[in-house]
Image (spheres, rainbow, N blue to C red):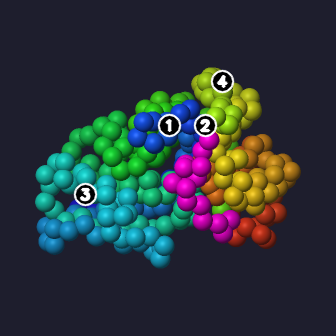
Amino acid sequence: MRVTEKAPAKLNLSLDTPMRYIDGSPQWDMVMISADLADYVTVETHEHPATIKVYTDSGFLPNDQRNLAYQAAHILRSRFHRHEGVTIHIQKNIPVAAGLGGGSSDAAAVLRALNNIWELGLSLKELAEIALTIDSDVPYCVYSRLAHVTGHGEKIELLPDQPHYWAVIAKQQISVSTPQILRQIDYTRLSHLDNQHLIECLKDGDWKHAIEYMDNVLEPVTMSVYPEIKRLKDKMVSLGADVAHMSGTGPTVFAICHNESRAKRIQNSISGFCRDVHVVTLL
């Protein structure tokens, strides 16, 4: 049987980390949304050979156990004692190593697809609990809709759908190491966010005031190493974006606009020095 799942990119409308757990991992307090920039993941099961194979159209991704999609298939197959082989084909549209959760979204798509193929009957909540063993962004990506995400990434409060907005997503030719950025966090110097007011605005459908509370506390950390990220963000704001921020640990910067014409104007203005630029709707 073969199933194809859409794997949308995620954006951090807000990203805060209140503390570090005793094991060194960060505690998260984030509001996340998905964008209509997506990979497409096709999962097929077969009797022979009983192996897991991953194929992508990107030369930058591993196709073995280092790939999160591979890990998702392995974990679900082991947990439910399935013996079939699994072949995964990933059509990449989300930039790699961009802070957009592409690998996590691909893994979540594999979980949803195999849940369907094997008729496991797992709810999205149950899939998200399994997903945490793969990566902290995978539980959110199981849902791929506006949510407040806390803890290690496993506590997910879904939020109401919002008005139709556009986003300009731009990734410069920079490679940012997430583990390296996380190690550089000095919790005594972070300016923590007022996510509760952001959530209240979103619950009230007040997007206009919600953007006032959108931010990413990791921006100063990443921008201290890559100042060109700040220059891109400032450029988007000067061109009329309602708000612009870095997603995740970077390097991608996204701008939110209330209409498509404004978004396309920003895209045209920055495409000369930033080749990887997309205008998409928020999901």
Q: Nearer the viewer, mark 3 or mark 2?
A: 2
Instruction: Classify 10 Å Cα crowding around label 2: few (below 14), some (14-19), many (20 and above).
Output: few
* Marks 3 and 2 close (CB-CB < 8 Å): no
List the residue tagged with mark 1. Answer: 20
Residue 144 percent across, percent down from the top left: 48, 44
Q: 25 or 92: which is nearer to us?
A: 25
List the residue tagged with mark 4. Answer: 197
The disc labelled 3 sits on which kind of residue?
His
Horizontal relation, residue 70 to residue 244: left or right: left
List the residue tagged with mark 2. Answer: 187
Q: Which is nearer the N-term, disc 1 or disc 2?
A: 1
Q: Which is nearer the N-term, disc 3 or disc 1?
A: 1
- Identify the element where label 3 is drawn: helix
Q: Which is nearer the N-term, disc 4 or disc 3?
A: 3
Q: 130 or 166: which is nearer to us?
A: 130
* Residue 74 disc label: 3
Q: 59 above or below 202?
A: below
Residue 260 percent across, percent down from the top left: 74, 51
| 3D distance between C-alphas at marks 3 and 1 | 29 Å
Which picture quadrant has residue 43?
bottom left
Residue range corresponding to the magenta coloring: 172-186
Quadrant occupied by the N terminus: bottom left
Residue 49 percent across, percent down from the top left: 16, 72
The disc labelled 4 sits on which kind of residue?
His
Q: Nearer the viewer, mark 4 or mark 2?
A: 2
